[in-house]
Amino acid sequence: MARGERRRRAVPTEGVRTAERAARGGPGRRDGRGGAPRSTAGGVAVAIVVLSLALGMFGRWVLAWHRARRAVTLHSAPPALPANSSSPAVAPGLFWGTYRPHVYFGMKTRSPKPLLTGLMWAQQGTTPGTPKLRHTCEQGDGVGPYGWEFHDGLSFGRQHIQDGALWLTTEFVKRPGGQHGGDWSWRVTVEPQASSTSALPLVSLFFYVVTDGKEVLLPEVEAKGQLKFISGHTSELGDFRFTLMPPTSPGDTTPKYGSYNVFWTSNPGLPLLTEMVKNSLNSWFQHRPPGASPERYLGLPGSLKWEDRGPSGQGQGQFLIQQVTLKVPFSIEFVFESGSAQAGGNQALPRLAGSLLTQTLESHAEAFRERFEKTFHLKEKGLTPGEQALGQVALSGLLGGIGYFYGQGLVLPDMGVEESEQKVDPALFPPVPLFTAVPSRSFFPRGFLWDEGFHQLVVQRWDPYLTREVLGHWLGLLNADGWIGREQILGDEARARVPPEFLVQRAVHANPPTLLLPVAHMLEGGDPDDLAFLRKAFPRLHAWFSWLHQSQAGPVPLSYRWRGRDPALPTLLNPKTLPSGLDDYPRASHPSVAERHLDLRCWVALGARVLMRLAEYLGEADVAAELGPLAASLEAAESLDELHWAQELGVFADFGNHTKAVQLKPRPPQGLVRVVGRPQPRLQYVDALGYVSLFPLLLQLLDPNSSRLGPLLDILADSRHLWSPFGLRSLAASSSFYGQRNSEHDPPYWRGAVWLNVNYLALGALHHYGQLKGPHQARAAKLHSELRANVVGNVWRQYQSTGFLWEQYSDRDGRGMGCRPFHGWTSLVLLAMAEDY
């Protein structure tokens, strides 16, 4: 197909040259005698050819233009959420939140032009030069463990952060009222580590407010130059005021002496805030508590005079930061008061600070504990207090990682040819909002499509309204064809943390449709609000599934192929399949259009089943009639066997142009290079026993009496293959790809490690088959019990040891690996503890 496209592109040039020769009386005219009729006839024929070629070229150009335009055009179906669903008028309780997951502590509004707040801190005098400024969560900055002890996803949270000898606790609570999202207060407590024997350090906290447009901030100064409060006004928030309360000793009202510095300038751009503050810490000041020796510290040399703020670009916004420096231990409170909330009653509300803040925080903490047990029943199930705390941390870390993003992504249109043939530039997608959880605050602080379905399985149990909001936002990203980008990089802050080569999303690349997992749970639960939402969301869900089913169709009916595999480069052991979500999981050694991918077929089968049931419930008879035969065909044992049962391997498998005789060998100066030996690749089933092999089981597509269920349980339970004391490994220990690097600079990822999302699917499947009558019922139930103990036990031990949930776990010793904290799908450990599938 691609070669034919090149040939067709070469034809018009030759046709034009022929026409030019004919017009000049060249080779198109054989002689000057008696040749006029032939020349005229030949000229007409050439003209017809040229015209047809020109029309063909024009038609292809129009088709290409149409494809490119649709790729960056939003879908026309009605939105799943009401208009202005993020505004304080529609959803006041969610307008403010900790929607900046990439910073250690900060809040913002759910708005394209938000008001942002945040915290930075630094230990003074512990290292030569500028102190280490903490602000954004980084994988290798030495901070940790850290994470939310409690977070209810709405109005309350408590987080602990270890930074060397310091122990920080950040808390927030919201108070509803007025028309603009109500009031909120922070409390930041800094204490020495219990085990620390060093002198109490001098610490600077930096509280800041950032506007992103023409909003007004007006600082009010006390007689001593200390910032009294910041008043302001925006169209979305009305009038408001920020107040930094005087510091106290932790747990009481004893005042603590603090030294103050301020900095007020134009907004340099959100990704540059840290660097601006770091560069501005260039003046020495004296901290002089009464009765104590003075100490030097580096402070901000700013001024609160309007004329000293420096140049301000049109609509650039403002950046106002107050530095407070004092000796640990201490607590300090930062209070936001909404003008409409304060004016809403007959008398002003008391400020949410001091003892009132303490009482409010404790009442929310107690309410969280009670609601948690009522929802997940961990104490009732006999889990230890430590395991219950792990469950609370898993949930809170996921909820505390929900962010609000707004911006334009880069999209490479699907031009209908193989990717190597595409010669178009990426285009900007329309500006869109996204309200979503993130996999990791330190490493992946943005939205990932296939992760989010797993995230919402947890969130939906806790707060169905939050899940409806998140699903509605993801479905709002649908383009005119029904495609959703698998990675959402929206806004300057998100873009600044992604390498340029990963910024572009390709409109032919799919991702596992895991959003249908919480959709299926909503449909089964029957909650009226959930069902009303699904009715509105149905046209978009159907369009999304239809795009997946059609765009990823394989070489034969009822087969499917992930578009977007890496090319067979000489440096890659096995070209990766990033759209599958399983990245470097071994596929056919030589990518081709003949491939049939087992996991994708199973995802499409799941989608057809869920959408058919939803269509039947909603009375969408035409869609149900369309999807019913597809779902039945995809779940038919004969069809699945014909396309994916590898008799010689005794398991289900991918199919493609493959050989096992590939390995990486050193070849100076190139480094490691792929060498292909004998036998040479041929079309066959791919011998790569692992998660992909289990997908008909994982997605519960097999009949409990299926003859294939037993062999799958055999390999699942065999320690030579997938079973480990810490969970199911992603690739069999018996595989030639097990633990192998994919390139010199690309260590193994899905080649043996234990991943919680797939282990959760396995637990759900074993639980399912353990409840259904059949020859494997007792064995499935037993394996469920043993696997649950292994998975939960290892996550708990690693959390005890490190204080983190991890991206993946070693199948050899159980240690946490990859990035941390990873409160994305590793939070599914909570549902495993609750046995909620």
Image: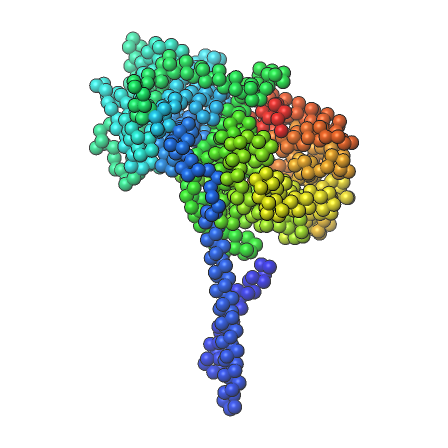
Colour convention of the picture = rainbow
In the image, what residue occupies the spot 26% across and 28% down? 218
Residue 12 % position (x, y): 51, 69
Report whether 415 appears left or right of 202: right
User: Closest to the observer: 615 or 113?
Assistant: 615
Residue 479 % position (x, y): 49, 47
User: Closest to the observer: 627 or 192?
Assistant: 627
In the image, what residue occupies the spot 58% across and 22% down? 376
Up-down relation of residue 364 to residue 688 (above or below): above
Q: Quadrant of the N terminus?
A: bottom right
Up-down relation of residue 749 to residue 30 (above or below): above
Quarter-wise, where is residue 583 in the image?
top right
Quarter-wise, where is residue 672 in the image?
top right
Up-down relation of residue 315 to residue 388 (above or below): below
Whether residue 387 appears in this view of the structure is: no
In the image, what residue occupies the spot 38% across and 38% down? 112
Residue 337 % position (x, y): 33, 23
Quarter-wise, where is residue 603 in the image?
top right
User: Closest to the observer: 226 or 532?
Assistant: 532
Q: Quadrant of the C terminus?
A: top right
Figure label count: 0
In the image, what residue occupies the spot 43% across and 17% down? 361
Report whether 836 appears left or right of 493: right
Whether residue 508 appears in this view of the structure is: yes
Residue 381 % position (x, y): 63, 18
Report whether 731 appears left or right of 95: right
